[in-house]
Image (cartoon, grey):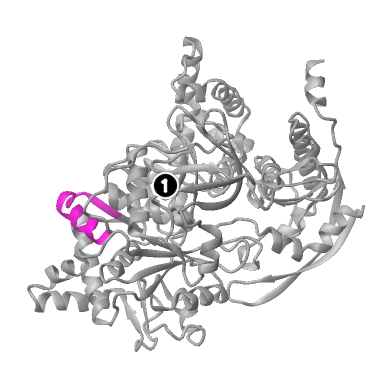
Amino acid sequence: MVGSASASKRADDTFPKILLHNAEVLGSRTAFREKDFGIWQSWTWSEVLEELRAFSLGLKSLGLSAGDKVAIVGSNRPRLYWSMVAVQALGGVPVPVYADSVAEEMAYVLGHAEVVFAIVEDQEQVDKLLGMSEEVPSLRHVIYDEPRGLRDYDHTRLHAFTSVQEKGRAALASDAGAADNWAKGFSGATGSDIAVMLYTSGTTGRPKGVMLSFDNLVISGRNGNKFDRLDETEEVLAYLPMAWIGDHVFSLAQAFTAGYCVNCPENMDTVDVDRLEIAPTYFFAPPRVYENLLTRIMVRMEDAGKLKKAMFDYFMGVARNTGERILNGEEVGLVDRMLYRMGEILVYGPLKNRMGLSRLKVGYTAGEAIGPEIFQFFRSLGLNLKQLYGQTEAAVYITLQPDGEIFGDTVGKPAPDVELKIAESGEVMYRSPGVFVGYFKNDEATASTKTPDGWVLTGDAGIIAENGHLKIIDRAKDVGKLTDGSLFAPKYIENKLKFFPNIKEVVAFGHERDSVAVFINIDLTAVGSWAERNNVNYASYQELAANPDVYKMIESHVDQVNRDLSAEPMMAGAQIKRFLVLHKELDADDGELTRTQKVRRSFIADRYEPLIEALYDGSKSKHVRTEVTFEDGRKGAIEATVEIRDMTVYPSGSIHREAAE
């Protein structure tokens, strides 16, 4: 299968060149905003050029040269986005790093990438980097954005962002041709040059450095903009990790190529309020964000008065019946349209406004599968939420859902310029202009992922449906079978459970076993709210997770999932036989999740082997001691006796038969 035609290629094929174009054509339009001390600060494209150019020339005066790798570490900040393009203007390669990485993880990435400069947000990141000088001997200079707490540090190799800009402005003041010479310095750069190096989240081992060219990012960005008709009037909220390909494309590649405005929140605690103030027109979030939004809505409605709750339930029923059909442009009766319009005034509109999505033109989710019920909930409100399928190695886009062709169980058709096929093994493969150049210093991994003729093996199992849409079943390596031959697709089961607001994370087991069993993490926000309403006292996650009433609540959710699975012929054999509620939340700092919040299955299987054995040997409980790691590297331990419960498994099709009777 081949996607639609791409946007035409242009001469401004690198981000520094695009910046010059935007400053000339869109000079007075707002390009970036940042909320600081409760006030939004703004920069136009002309101002961004001036700020970025001064910083780039300052970096040059410090000795940054072509080919040098520069780490970018911190939260979403305009100066950090500008830093990446300032480095590219000198021929350097930015390497965004997850800001919440523990020191060991960060040291590995910086050492492997051979970074010579690091541009960071604040004192916390400075302390991390200064503490790993032995592990990263190539690091010569560290530049920080926020000066608080750093006044008394040794500034021999440490520099304030503003002081580097001052060096650049001094060069501009002393040489009338400095600005032109700076632009001439990257005029000869081409789209095939390396633009950025992004490290994979490392679900199966050490992270790999994915080298992406300007062509990979610029063409993908322009294709994405053309597909959804995005232009310079869009507003986005940049709040996802800068080291993640999704943020890099949505907040930099598409922003520069479309010329739209990127808004940076004050901090992660204010994201919801800041989104409400900005009301983005283009919004991207992984499923977890939408799950959390839904959880908060349901928690608030549980606390609402009877009349308000009854009105919510009624109009959400109307939305489920007609909302998606109206959004898709299908024929809907007059009475249903009138009821839906009334629901928009009383329920849907206020809900969208409360979430900060009242102006949404198009929203996306990706990263992992989203529960169909969650997906339907947001679309039924009239929000044009779509799924896409992508990878770092593809510069995001592999498939996209065209307007009017939105299906909860598929991830769309091939994106513009993308070729798609299914290998004999069932693995999804693609070829596109976004295909990465290679893995840094890892030719073996590159050869095992990308064929000589440019096809990339995704590692995902999927099928192309009759309507031409791609359906992802699961990670190819994770799809298995029970001993009786029943299909075992763990992610499918996990997503069904994660639809319930009380459940935050799930890990399913069953491959080459006689039944399916699961670990469950409760959602502390949702279950904590329930505890408050029911006068249940608790002092920690561990105590709440072990509460008998909480177990009863989770048991009812597992039972509902089993009933649903029994009605699906392909999945009826994969009903959940036993479950337990984990005594701790799965955490990236403990290696259980990646920095993009994906489950590290093999790590969890090793770490919690005694609990998995207990699930399958008939034990009713198991005492366990688990070591935990704090962000500063300190170690601790959590001990608990974890209860294990048995579940009813229903005959295939029995629920449908009961309903019919």
* Residue 313 magenta: no
Seen as rendered, the residue at the extreme left is 176
380 left or right of 170 in image: right
Question: Is 128 above or below relative to 291?
Answer: below
In the image, what residue type sits under mark 1? Answer: Arg
- Expressed as whole percent of the image width and height from the top left, the position of residue 591 reads 64, 66
Residue 564's place in the image compared with 421, above or below, is above
Q: Position of residue 159 (x, y in %)?
A: 33, 80
Q: Is residue 106 above or below residue 554?
A: below
Number of residues whose C-alpha sits closer than 10 Å to that of mark 1, classed few (under 14), some (14–19) or many (20 or more): many
Q: Quadrant of the C terminus?
A: top right
Report which residue position mark 1 lands on.
Answer: 275
Residue 111 in the figure: left or right of residue 7: right
Q: Is residue 270 visible?
A: no
Q: How many marks?
A: 1
- Closer to the camera in the image, 259 or 421: 421
Of 352 and 320, which appears nearest the observer?
320
Residue 128 placement, left or right of 249 = right
Q: Nearer the viewer, residue 248 or 457?
A: 457
- Seen in the picture, residue 201 relative to 397 is either above or below; the reply is below
Q: Main secondary structure of the magenta part?
A: helix
The residue drawn where x is 78% and y is 34% is 572
Q: Which residues are magenta?
A: 15-32
Q: Secondary structure at mark 1?
A: helix
Q: Can the viewer see residue 251? A: yes
**26 falls in the magenta region:** yes
Residue 94 picture location, percent across and down = 37, 68
Residue 176 located left or right of residue 362? left
| Spot occupied by residue 342 in the image (x, y as percentages of width and height) | 47, 20
Q: What residue is rendered at 77% in x and 47% in y?
A: 550
